[in-house]
Amino acid sequence: MSRVRTTRRVKLGQGGFTLIELVIVIITLGILAAVGIPKFAAMHESAKINATKQEMAVLKKAIVGNPAAVAGGEYIDRGFEGDVGSVASALVDLVVKPDSISSYDKLTRLGWNGPYIDSSGGDYLRDAWGNNYVYQPGSRRIISTGGGGDSIIVSF
């Protein structure tokens, strides 16, 4: 019995990609990146706007409460204004009890009954761009100026 030995031979130049194929792939990736990056940037900006609007809605609810939350014929989510009788003089008042306001009394249902929002290390004071909110208790508005040329305004 004789064994026949077969060997494979690979010719040079048959394994791998040609330079032209690699250049075509690089150009295609460049075109995709040129189209995709601006769309991603616009999507990122839109996400910041939505996050800021949601946070401002939470701040509004903390100040004025939620009139839809009723149990036993009484409001159960009265917010800062419902508990204290006036709007907060600063956004910090939603987390830390001001010295000028008494603690909550269960009989009269008046006084500071907070914190009204999660303080999260002070993040509630800034919008998604890192700018401080402009809080105007007299005109009952919260303003975010971080959205480029347009401001986001929530009235309460």
Image: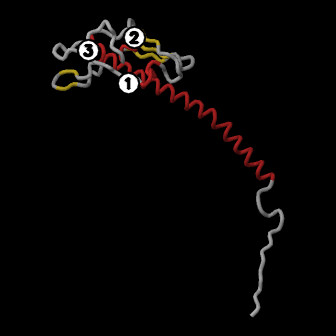
Q: Badge 1 is on which residue?
A: 118
Q: Earlier in the sequence, mark 1 or mark 3?
A: 3
Q: Image check: 1 left or right of 62? A: right
Secondary structure, mark 1, is: loop
Front position in the image: 125 or 150: 125
Q: Quadrant of the C terminus?
A: top left
* Label 2 neighbour load within 10 Å: few <14, some 14-19, many 20+: few
Question: Hey, which quadrant is residue 61 in on the image?
Answer: top left
Q: Badge 3 is on which residue?
A: 83
Q: Image check: 62 left or right of 44? A: left
What amino acid is found at the position of numbered circle 3 in the picture?
Asp
Q: Position of residue 60 (x, y in %)?
A: 37, 18
Which one is closest to the eye, mark 1 or mark 3?
1
Q: Mark 2 to mark 3: distance in Å?
A: 16 Å
Asked whether the beta carbons under mark 1 and mark 3 sit within 8 Å of each other, the answer is: no
Question: Hey, which quadrant is residue 76 in on the image?
Answer: top left
Q: Earlier in the sequence, mark 2 or mark 3?
A: 3
Q: Position of residue 155 (x, y in %)?
A: 39, 14
Q: Mark 1 to mark 2: distance in Å?
A: 15 Å
What amino acid is found at the position of numbered circle 2 in the picture?
Ala
Q: Image check: 25 left or right of 155? A: right
Q: Badge 2 is on which residue?
A: 90
Q: Quadrant of the N terminus?
A: bottom right
Secondary structure, mark 2, is: loop
Who's the residue at 42% across and 24% down the image?
A: 55
Disc number at residue 47? none
